[in-house]
């Protein structure tokens, strides 16, 4: 097939691709999106042409009949990528298009506010913004709760600039932002690690006559404590909370944050002070506070006190969650008491709490650290027989366990089984095997594994 024929094929495919998505049955009046789709189709054609011309110029003696499959491979890759992107777009705009057909005949805008909130919860922010613009074009401004959903969606997605633009619009044309709006935005910057910007937003609240609350305080306090600035956090508490607030029972979230920071700084006495203060003032202690307390005493190796707290937790009618059990399992695995860890796991299963990948990883690591790789392999096989295919790091733990014991052949067999079950080996898999081979004096075999790694597109 001649190169000109290949180019015609690209042009034809691009044209059909564009025509497919220009159908009014797919989109009703969504002209901007239609133009975007057409642009993508044109990009496919132009990019493929450039690749072909580049390939042709680098191979002057290229025979036109030599490798036509190259062209089809390029076309297939480009179209597959574009189809994936369009599938995502189509899912994102399907609901707004239904709403568009209704919005021209209905004035029940409260229903559309609910749609916007649902779309934000599903991460379909562009679609939510589009409905908002349609509502505003009809003279209806969605309420502050709906806008807060949008701000929260942008912050969760890491689009803080978009959240900032939206809040500026709210300040200019309504609805006026409230404390929840700023709390959400401040938390977004705290999660990003930009505490300075978070405090800048906090300062701007007064300029807009918005009073911070305990939630504002807890967000900033947590961010400061994560950076080891606990004393700054205490001062913040005094500044934000007035006398009226101080007379209320101690806030469980505030106390939990301070308690966690104390444990991490090794100040068990101060952490215990916060705990006792909550008990004395009748604060309703939740499972998170119990988990922080238990984890803190496990960190300080006072597991008896941690178990005492565990018993108090049960007597209070608060059921331990996955985090509670993982804390104990982690502790016992680290000190080599796998029998205790296994007992905790058994109790956890009896309480109908399902282990997660962290639980499984700790169990496998505990077995391998104790040299019981055979038992780890038996559990792995049991999981596979029950159609539970573990995550890559579980396989890596077992491979590392065999490598550490000098059983390189067994490690390689586990790696082959890993591939057979559809799990792609990662850099840790290859590094573990290569290290074991080099340690065993099999340098050539290690180099072969390195070649396999490069061939599998895993970067050393």
Image (cartoon, rainbow, N blue to C red):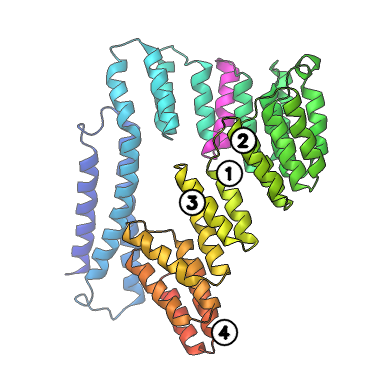
- The residue singled out by tag 4 in the image is 439
The magenta stretch is: 155-176
Q: Secondary structure under badge 4? A: helix
Task: Check disc 3: other Cα within 10 Å, few if <14, some if 14-19, many if 20+.
Answer: few
Whether residue 288 is situated above or below residue 333 in the rendered picture = above
Q: Quadrant of residue 179?
A: top right
- The residue at which mark 2 appears reads as 313
Between disc 2 and disc 1, whose residue precedes?
Answer: 2
Q: Are marks 3 and 1 in contact (CB under 8 Å)?
A: no
Q: Position of residue 343 (x, y in %)?
A: 53, 53
Query: Residue shown at 74%/47% (left/top)?
Result: 264
Task: Find residue 59 and report its horizontal and vertical position in percent.
Answer: 33, 77
Disc number lying in front (3 or 1): 3
Q: CA distance from mark 2 to mark 4?
A: 49 Å
Distance between the alpha carbons at the discs numbered 4 and 3? 37 Å
First-in-chain label (4 vs 3): 3
**CA gap, disc 2 to disc 3?**
19 Å
Q: Nearer the viewer, mark 1 or mark 4?
A: 1
Q: Is residue 161 magenta?
A: yes
Give me the residue at 54% from left, 58% from top: 362
Instruction: Give the alpha-carbon distance from disc 3 to disc 1, as whole Å.
Output: 14 Å
């Amino acid at each position: 097939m001649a190169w000109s024929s290949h180019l015609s094929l690209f042009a034809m495919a691009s044209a059909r691709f564009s025509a497919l998505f220009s159908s009014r049955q797919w989109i009703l009046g969504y002209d901007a999106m239609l133009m975007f789709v057409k642009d993508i189709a044109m990009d496919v054609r132009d990019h493929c042409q450039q690749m072909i011309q580049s390939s042709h110029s680098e191979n002057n003696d290229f025979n036109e009949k030599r490798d036509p499959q190259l062209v089809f491979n390029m076309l297939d890759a480009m179209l597959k990528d574009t189809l994936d992107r369009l599938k995502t777009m189509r899912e994102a705009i399907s609901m707004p298009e239904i709403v568009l057909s209704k919005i021209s005949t209905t004035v029940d805008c409260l229903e559309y506010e609910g749609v916007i909130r649902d779309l934000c919860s599903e991460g379909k922010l562009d679609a939510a913004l589009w409905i908002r613009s349609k509502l505003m074009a009809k003279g209806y401004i969605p309420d502050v709760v709906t806008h807060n959903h949008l701000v929260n969606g942008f912050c969760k997605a890491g689009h803080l600039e978009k959240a900032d633009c939206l809040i500026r619009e709210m300040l200019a044309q309504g609805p006026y932002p409230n404390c929840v709006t700023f709390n959400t935005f401040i938390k977004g910057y705290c999660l990003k690690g930009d505490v300075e910007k978070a405090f800048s937003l906090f300062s701007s609240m007064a300029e807009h006559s918005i009073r911070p609350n305990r939630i504002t305080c807890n967000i900033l306090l947590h961010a400061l404590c994560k950076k080891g600035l606990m004393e700054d956090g205490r001062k913040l508490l005094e500044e934000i909370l007035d006398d009226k607030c101080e007379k209320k029972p101690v806030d469980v979230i505030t106390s939990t944050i301070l308690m966690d920071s104390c444990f991490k700084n090794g100040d068990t006495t101060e952490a215990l002070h916060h705990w006792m203060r909550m008990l004395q003032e009748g604060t309703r202690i939740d499972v998170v506070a119990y988990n922080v307390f238990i984890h803190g005493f496990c960190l300080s190796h006072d597991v008896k006190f941690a178990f005492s707290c565990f018993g108090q937790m049960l007597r209070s009618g608060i059921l331990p969650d996955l985090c509670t059990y993982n804390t104990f399992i982690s502790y016992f695995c680290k000190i080599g008491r796998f029998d205790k860890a296994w007992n905790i796991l058994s109790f956890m299963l009896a309480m109908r709490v399902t282990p997660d990948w962290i639980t499984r990883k700790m169990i496998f690591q505990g077995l391998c650290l104790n040299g019981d790789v055979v038992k780890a392999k038996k559990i792995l096989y049991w999981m596979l027989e029950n159609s539970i295919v573990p995550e890559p790091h579980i396989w890596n733990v077992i491979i590392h366990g065999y490598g550490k014991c000098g059983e390189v052949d067994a490690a390689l067999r586990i790696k082959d089984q890993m591939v057979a079950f559809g799990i792609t080996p990662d850099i840790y898999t290859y590094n573990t095997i290569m290290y074991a081979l080099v340690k065993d004096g099999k340098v050539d075999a290690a180099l072969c594994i390195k070649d396999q790694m490069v061939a599998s597109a895993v970067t050393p």
